[in-house]
Amino acid sequence: IAGITQAPTSQILAAGRRMTLRCTQDMRHNAMYWYRQDLGLGLRLIHYSNTAGTTGKGEVPDGYSVSRANTDDFPLTLASAVPSQTSVYFCASTASGGTGELFFGEGSRLTVL
Amino acid sequence: GQNIDQPTEMTATEGAIVQINCTYQTSGFNGLFWYQQHAGEAPTFLSYNVLDGLEEKGRFSSFLSRSKGYSYLLLKELQMKDSASYLCAVMDSNYQLIWGAGTKLIIKP
């Protein structure tokens, strides 16, 4: 089934641990994004990639890093997790030159204790 | 700064009509989006407006006035499955999406 797959769907993590959230899409979309969603706030962009080999910082990049080695994969890494990183994380992608419609993964719920 | 405003929560009755408003102040404008998000699920695309006017798609319609920085999403013949959060987002001059906090719509029988 075409779309975006995120893993894990849920994770409880001790503060200070390293964590990588995985994101894979099979739609051959050039642009990919990582958002976090917190209660009462809009989706906030963490990092993005307009094409394989390039990445950029979004609104809230501190404490997170990404890589884009190929078109399909866009992992998000928390080098040393802190409780304020407790959130729901969504990966999304879009086709270049389109209306900008985003396709989202199912989300990864992360709790940092 | 950039800002998207929409009501936090609305309640409507099954079979009725509801209008969800969104006002925005952004640096530039390259389109406005509405997404639907059911609890515990990912957002899904509903509509895109870049020119003034009304776009109709089945029971859902979206309106845009660029001069007023205003949009609304109109939902007709409400069904229980329409209970969800509705997210308004504007694409700014850098082609980045600015998101509102969402409007939680509660449908009562």
Image: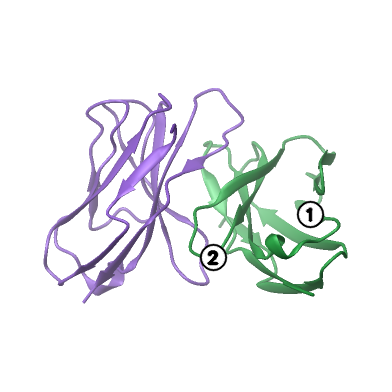
Chain colours: A purple, B green
In the image: residue A92, left or right of residue B29: left
What's the mark number on residue B39? 2
Q: Amino acid at mark 2?
A: Ala
Say which of A45 and A22 sits in front. A22
In the image: residue B49, left or right of residue A40: right
**Crowd class of label 2 (few under 14; some 14 to 19; many from 20; radius 10 Å):** few
What's the mark number on residue B72? 1
Q: Is residue A36 above or below residue A30?
A: below
What's the chain of the residue with tag 2? B
What's the mark number on residue A52? none
Which secondary structure, mark 2?
loop
Q: What is the quadrant of residue B58 in the picture?
A: top right
In the image: residue B104, left or right of residue A7: right
Real-space Cα separation, disc 2 to disc 1, in angstroms: 21 Å
Q: What residue is rendered at 49% in x and 27% in y?
A: A95
Quadrant containing the N terminus of chain A in the rendered view: top left
Q: Position of residue A33 (x, y in %)?
A: 40, 42
What's the chain of the residue with tag 1? B
- Residue furthest to the left: A17
Q: Amino acid at mark 1?
A: Tyr
